[in-house]
Amino acid sequence: MRGIHDLGGMYGFGPVVRETDEPVFHELWQETAFAVLMAAGTVLPDFNADQYRHSVERMAPSHYLSVHYYERMLTGITTLMVEQGALDLADLEARAGGAFPLALPVAAVPMADLAPQPVARFHVGQQVRVRQYSPMGHTRAPGFCRGKTGTVLRVTPKFSFPDAAAHGGDRRDEHTYHVEFTARELWGSDNGDRDSVVVDLWDSYLEGAGA
């Protein structure tokens, strides 16, 4: 999906401020939120990292942008616990002393129609284009590179396909690629070809540049 979480290439959010000697957690509740996430695999009957990522992506845009990282984490994992029956929302809100906002529901038909690609179709040095598509569900193809052409730098071993894993589909392993895009290709003619961005992309996201 192309939601508010897909911020790559977007302007207006200000600089990234680096905190000197930043602690791992600023407050105790943040440590607790992280511990809950780490324990999720022992609590939830169906849980994986892509499913969790999508629960955070489903947060209402105004909520997502108004809170910090660990509150997004807490919202995402709590949403999954309620959806999978590990928590009762009414009981949770009673304990919290008020409303506990969850992420929005999963789309009715969340997955894009991407055929499985069990064999690596591309090779190092090949020009490839990222498919221009907008699935309703989870994907790891950033919006800023969709429709753009890059060069394969490396072919990596097969790995779980996130678009399927996030929605409980059959496990699907596909090769991934390190694909390099020039700044000019991504951001337009005002940028040069000496700067580039490398993106890890699954086989199903790509097509030959001549396709």
Image (cartoon, grey):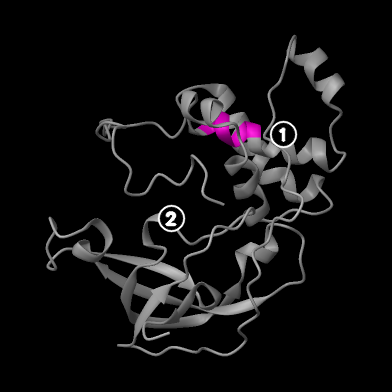
The residue wearing badge 1 is 78
* Residue name at image x 60 percent, y 83 percent: 117
Q: In x, y percent, where is residue 122?
A: 44, 88
Please report the bounds of the magenta region as a residue range.
70-75
Rendered-image quadrant of the C terminus:
bottom left
Asked if residue 72 is among those painted magenta in the image, a careful observer would answer yes
Does 74 appear in magenta?
Answer: yes
Residue 100 horizontal/vertical position (percent) = 71, 20
Question: Which amino acid, mark 1?
Answer: Thr
Q: Which mark is residue 143?
A: 2
- Is 103 positioned to the left or the right of 66 in the image? right
Residue 177 in percent (x, y) is at 43, 77
Of the pair 35 and 121, the residue shown nearer to us? 121
Q: Image height check: is 136 above or below 76?
A: below
Residue displayed at 14% across by 68% down: 193
Q: CA distance from mark 2 to mark 1?
A: 27 Å
Mark 2: which secondary structure? helix
**Amino acid under disc 2:** Gly
